[in-house]
Image: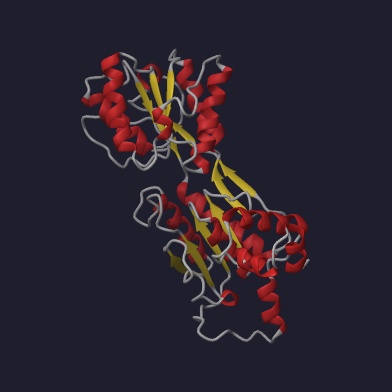
């Protein structure tokens, strides 16, 4: 399969195909997606550059940085609070680094967002592979795939770019948590967090909705509940909505939150507005980050995420891919663990739920 055949299929120029598949600008996003989809459907080989280099004797292009053959790139663009210092993302990186150290493999951290410089300074033939952590733009993933570098994604996937991925089993564990809340007799539940924020949030929202539907309860729909719009401006939404719900006496019996950060915002606002937690309203989170613990707040019920194991599993998948480049792509799901604590614990003090603490 050649670029010209893809160009004929989509009805664009060969130059446009080349620009799109290499992640370069100059192609409309809709056209780029059509080209990528056609390439996937037609079985286009994304290793063209590597194959040509090998055919030419393996000569390295001038100006490329020399990277040791025993190096794996960890890519985590600085977007949406993704950083090495994050209580959530940092533990995943720790798992990746530890697993690579055991294999005596070096690490190269790349943390800038998409730009023309991201991979141009790296010799793809000198890199074993790449592990992407969190959200990575489609254009950057295209550039990585076009370079021929094997890669695994953690907590992210792109429908247009097939790859090995590692996730929490967000849907099942959130469904289990929501069902537990419903079994306590609380029926009017609200989900806090935007389903469009990330794939993990979307799966957690689906688990919440399914548990509600199976219990015969109606979940608020997208577009009718401001709490389903909580993303980067979560502070503003919580500071507006919670006092308003308290004043109107329209508080739900429980807030099921997409992560611990949103849960702590809701929990603090409820307490500040004189609401008793969990007697009047229960609050649950997700991730087990314990990032904003305060003595005057009930301890948050949450889901323990094995972050470091997510990182280790990504390394295992990368080396399995290196052993067999033609194996089918895999999506690995790791199960979490419910931590029932003070923000919801009183009805379940005797419930035999294991603790990860």
Is 307 positioned to the left or the right of 244 in the image? right
- Do we see residue 54 in this rendering? yes
Residue drawn 67% across the image and 54% down it: 34
- Residue 273, position as x, y percentages in the image: 22, 22
Q: How is the image coloured?
A: secondary structure
Residue drawn 48% across the image and 62% down it: 75
| The C terminus lies in quadrant | top left
The quarter of the picture where residue 148 lies is bottom right
Closest to the observer: 202 or 340? 202
- Do we see residue 299 in this rendering? no
- Residue 182, position as x, y percentages in the image: 48, 17
How many circles with numbers are drawn on the protein? 0
The quarter of the picture where residue 145 lies is bottom right
- Residue 284, position as x, y percentages in the image: 39, 29
| The N terminus lies in quadrant | bottom right
- Residue 172, position as x, y percentages in the image: 56, 32
Closest to the observer: 351 or 257? 257
Query: Where 274 falls versus 84 (above or below)?
Result: above
Is 238 positioned to the left or the right of 167 in the image? left
Closest to the observer: 88 or 43? 43
Residue drawn 28% across the image and 40% down it: 292
Is 102 positioned to the left or the right of 234 in the image? right
Residue drawn 44% across the image and 59% down it: 77
């Amino acid at each position: 399969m050649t670029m010209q055949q893809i160009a004929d299929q989509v009805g664009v120029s060969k130059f446009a195909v080349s620009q799109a598949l290499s992640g370069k600008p100059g192609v409309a996003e809709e056209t780029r997606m059509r080209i990528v989809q056609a390439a996937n459907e037609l079985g286009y080989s994304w290793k063209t550059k590597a194959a040509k280099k090998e055919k030419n004797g393996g000569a390295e292009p001038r100006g490329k940085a020399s990277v040791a053959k025993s190096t794996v790139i960890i890519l985590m663009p600085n977007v949406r609070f993704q950083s090495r210092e994050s209580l959530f993302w940092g533990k995943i990186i720790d798992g990746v680094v530890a697993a690579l150290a055991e294999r005596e493999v070096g690490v190269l951290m790349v943390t800038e967002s998409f730009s023309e410089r991201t991979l141009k300074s790296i010799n793809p033939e000198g890199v074993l592979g790449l592990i992407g952590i969190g959200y990575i733009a489609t254009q950057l993933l295209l550039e990585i795939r076009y370079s021929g570098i094997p890669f695994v994604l953690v907590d992210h996937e792109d429908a247009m770019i097939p790859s090995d991925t590692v996730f929490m089993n967000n849907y099942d564990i959130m469904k289990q948590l929501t069902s537990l809340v419903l079994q306590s007799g609380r029926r009017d539940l609200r989900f806090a967090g935007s389903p469009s924020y990330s794939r993990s949030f979307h799966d957690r929202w689906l688990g919440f909705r399914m548990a509600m539907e199976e219990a015969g309860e109606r979940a608020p729909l997208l577009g009718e509940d401001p709490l389903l719009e909580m993303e980067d401006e979560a502070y503003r939404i919580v500071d507006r909505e919670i006092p308003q719900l308290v004043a109107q006496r329209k508080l739900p019996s429980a807030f099921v939150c997409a992560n611990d950060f949103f849960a702590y915002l809701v929990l603090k606002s409820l307490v500040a507005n004189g609401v008793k937690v969990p007697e009047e309203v229960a609050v649950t989170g997700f991730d087990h980050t314990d990032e904003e613990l305060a003595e005057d707040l009930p301890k948050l019920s949450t889901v323990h995420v094995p972050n470091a194991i997510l990182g280790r599993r990504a390394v295992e998948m990368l080396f399995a891919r290196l052993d067999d480049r033609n194996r089918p792509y895999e999506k690995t799901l790791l199960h979490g663990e419910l931590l029932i604590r003070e923000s919801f614990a009183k009805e379940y003090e005797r419930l035999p739920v294991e603790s990860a603490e």
